[in-house]
Image (cartoon, rainbow, N blue to C red):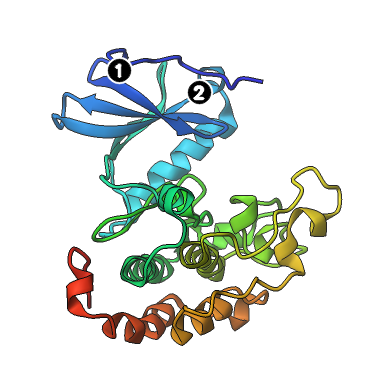
Amino acid sequence: MARDSWHLTEGDAITPELTAVKLLGGGSSYEAFLAFDDITYAPVVVKVVRPGLVADASALRGLRREVEALATVNHPVVVRGLRHRLDGDRPHVVLEQVDGPRLSTLVRRYGPLQEQQYLPLAIEVASALHYLRHLGWTHLDIKPSNVIMGAPARLIDLSVARPVDAAAALTSPIGTDAYMAPEQTDPPATGVPGWASDVWGLGATLFEAVAGHRAFPDGDPDAPDLRDRYPQLWADPQPLPDRVPHEVVKTVGAMLERDPADRPLPHEVAEALEPALDRLPRARLAGFRTR
């Protein structure tokens, strides 16, 4: 079944100040457009609540939560919110437009990344997770399609982000199936989501960047048994290729521990990976930020 859509094409007005350029994608509650903004006089990304959900309390609550997250988080690796409107005909949030491909696109097209690509990426996203933990927030949807490659990498989509106390109170799955930490799959029965869930998501994301495939077999989204839907509840991650540096293998394994208490802190992830980055010849790091 086709999703509820605004059917906007190039040149259509989203609002009087925002002109659609192209549809970028979207989720169950919103569509995302690349647009030109007459106020900033620059390209932006606009997330618009789908037309059938304009009066839906749950969809508007989700948009309000994302606006709160964007207003709270201010980090160079996290996308910035520019402005928003939570009422009217088209409730929306305006975000900065970040140049660069998504990590998911690079892996799908070209396979595993090289060390000089995935090591800065992992360290930079870990720095954002360290900051979120310091603020008392958690992203809850770390995955390759939410990472834009660049110098630095950028973390996008705060649509399910929330304070850690709100994350701890969750009673239903949240995130994306293949990248959910075990405790996110059926809280509170499977555990308490929090900052360690983001470390797990980064571990699954880094594994995919390094290996070119996911760490766990695909689950069946329609399976009645939770273990069939989420193999991460019982399966061990697949081994990384022999070519991968020891520090990376060890760190990814620690990040993907089933027990949140056994996972490293975000800054420990960065510190563990920096020796592997430091060993790379400087000429191979051109265009990438180093520490």
| Position of residue 288 measured from the top left corner of the image (x, y, whole percent) | 22, 66
Against 25, residue 50 (above or below) is above
* Helix, strand or loop status at disc 2: loop
Q: State the residue in front, 175 or 287.
A: 287
Pointer 1 local density, CA inside 10 Å: few below 14, some 14–19, many at least 20:
few
Q: Tell me residue 42's x, y (percent).
A: 16, 32
| Mark sitting earlier along the chain (1/2) | 1
Residue 90 placement, left or right of 253: left
Q: Work out how far the residue at label 1 is from the one at label 2, CA to CA, in angstroms.
A: 14 Å
| Amino acid beneath label 2 | Arg
In the depicted view, which residue is nearer to us: 110 or 141? 110
Question: Is 128 on the left-hand or right-hand side of 159?
Answer: left
Q: How many marks?
A: 2
Q: Tag 1, which secondary structure?
A: strand
Q: Tell me which residue sits at (22%, 72%) in the image.
A: 284
Residue 29 quadrant? top right
Q: Which mark is residue 50?
A: 2
Q: In the drawing, what numbered circle is on residue 43?
A: none
Instruction: State the quadrant of the C terminus.
Output: bottom left
What amino acid does circle 1 point to? Answer: Thr
Q: Residue at x 55, y 62 (%)?
A: 165
> Label 1, on which residue?
15
